[in-house]
Amino acid sequence: MKGVTLIKAISASAAAFMAFSVSAPAQAPELALLNSLQKGEWTLKARGSDNGGQKVCLGDPGILLQIKHSGVACSRYVIQDTPNSIRVSYKCGSSDHGVTTIKRESSGLVQIQSQGIEGNAPFSFSVEGRRTGTC
């Protein structure tokens, strides 16, 4: 009888513990570097390139983390987060993924390196992002 009472007490304690240990969905981490960048039009250009580069309107600076997978909902994992450098790994669906490093030189100038897989093909690039105006 004592064994049954002990098992019931342990079961009740475990149930109470589980009820209080259920966590809420994870919030996206705030990345200080991204929040410190100026909003507006940015030009992403390969260093040393003569072409005009790719123009993006930077409302949500998170788009710089997954340039090759823009507009796609991806899960992200922050590898490194310092005031002047971030490194984030992301996964989009079952096969597309990447790792992006952003180094901040000023609130209007960053260096971006990214590599990963898009559509079953590898990619790797380095660009300079510079604020060029308003949008």
Image (spheres, grey):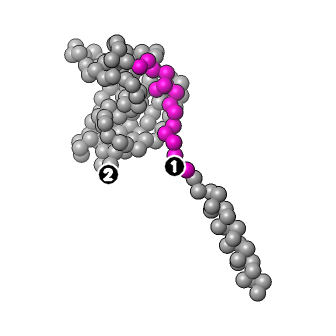
- Find disc 2 in the rendering and name its residue: 94
Give the CA separation, mark 2 to mark 1. Answer: 21 Å
Q: Is residue 11 magenta?
A: no
Q: Is residue 32 magenta?
A: yes
Query: Circles 2 and 1: CB distance less than 8 Å?
Result: no
Left or right of residue 134, residue 49 in this image: left
The location of residue 33, given as percent across then percent down, is 49, 25
Judging from the image, what secondary structure is the residue with disc 1 in?
loop
Which contiguous range is marked in magenta?
Answer: 24-39
Badge 1, how many Cα within 10 Å: few under 14, some, many 20+? few
The location of residue 32, given as percent across then percent down, is 52, 27
- Nearest the eye: 65 or 60: 60
Figure check: 116 above or below 41: below
Type of residue at label 2? Ser
- Find disc 1 in the rendering and name its residue: 25
Badge 2, how many Cα within 10 Å: few under 14, some, many 20+? few
Type of residue at label 1? Pro
- Nearest the eye: 129 or 123: 129
User: Which image quarter is the C terminus in?
Assistant: top left
User: Residue farthest to the bottom?
Assistant: 1
Q: Is residue 105 visible?
A: no
Task: Say which of marks 2 and 1 sits in front.
Answer: 1
Total number of numbered discs in the rendering: 2
Left or right of residue 106, residue 46 in this image: left
- Nearest the eye: 14 or 120: 14
The location of residue 96, given as percent across then percent down, is 30, 45
The location of residue 15, given as percent across then percent down, is 65, 67
Q: Residue at x 23, y 44 (%)?
A: 119
User: Can you tell which quarter of the image residue 92 is in?
Assistant: top left
- Nearest the eye: 102 or 14: 14
User: Which image quarter is the N terminus in?
Assistant: bottom right
Q: Residue at x 67, y 73 (%)?
A: 11
